[in-house]
Amino acid sequence: VIGCMSPENVKYVISNNYVKTKIVEICPNTITPQNIDLKDSEKKSIRQKYDIPIDKTIYVYGGNIGKPQGVDFIVECLRQNEANVETFILIVGSGTEYKRLRKAFDTYKFKKSKLLESMPKSDYELLANASDVGLVFLDSRFTIPNFPSRILSYMQAGMPILLATDKSTDVGRLVEENLFGHWCESTKSDRFIELMNLFKDEVYREELGRNAKRYLNNNYTSKHAYEIIMSHFEK
């Protein structure tokens, strides 16, 4: 049996390989959710620790910074976000394109965003929980459906998600259909900025965040993956 991360992954495997339809199924990325419930005072303290504004909507990206993320598009979004008064973009990670992104920060002297190198997972989880919106970037040229596992940490934190990806993946559609985020193609930086502005309303963010956590608990826990796998041994 072949486990795939999403419906589009299933379709891709079947259409591009000589396999029987019945042996390909969805077995998504999963986690064992941890409850990190920070008080407002703790969130403020964490933001101050990393010199992040305490009075703005914080959009956080955490993970690999490489070719798959489409750094040119990210830089263009960062440049356009400089005109926003209430938003701040935080990027945390490492990878083959980190130095190029670091150079862009040094060149443009961004005031509405910050770049941090990767940190211990426990520190990052706290930082993510002190943020407001999770970001996902994928290069627009992808033709194979990707389903980034980083959305799970955002969902665990009860955060809405803003995605800029290629048209092949169905992760954006899943997030929008289940009402915990928004999506645009990663060639449209203007649209990305428009979507950012939707999240400035705290009540709206909290509603989407609750939907994200609920969907995680109903679909993406380790228990769900275990049950899918073990069902083939219990027949």
Image (cartoon, rainbow, N blue to C red):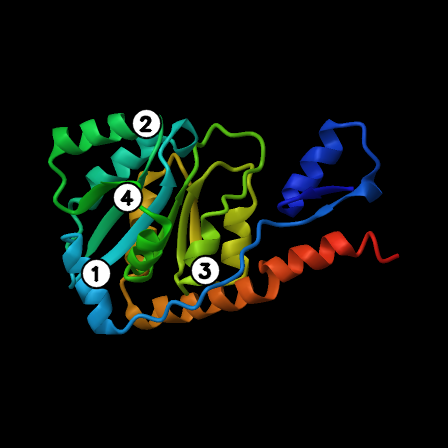
Q: Helix, strand, or loop for circle 1?
A: helix
Q: Is residue 45 above or below residue 106?
A: below
Mark in the foreground, 1 or 2: 1
Q: Which residue is mark 4?
A: 91
Q: Which residue is mark 3?
A: 155
**Placement of the C terminus among the 4 image quadrants:** bottom right
2 or 3: tag closer to the N-terminus? 2
4 or 2: tag closer to the N-terminus? 4
Q: State the image coordinates of residue 185 (x, y, percent, origin top left).
A: 43, 40
Q: Which residue is mark 1?
A: 46
Image side of residue 28 versus residue 3, left or right: left
1 or 3: tag closer to the N-terminus? 1
Residue at image position (68%, 56%) is: 226
Q: Quadrant of residue 190?
A: top left
Q: Helix, strand, or loop for circle 3?
A: helix
Q: Residues within 10 Å of mark 2 (few under 14, many from 20)?
A: some
Q: Which residue is mark 2?
A: 97
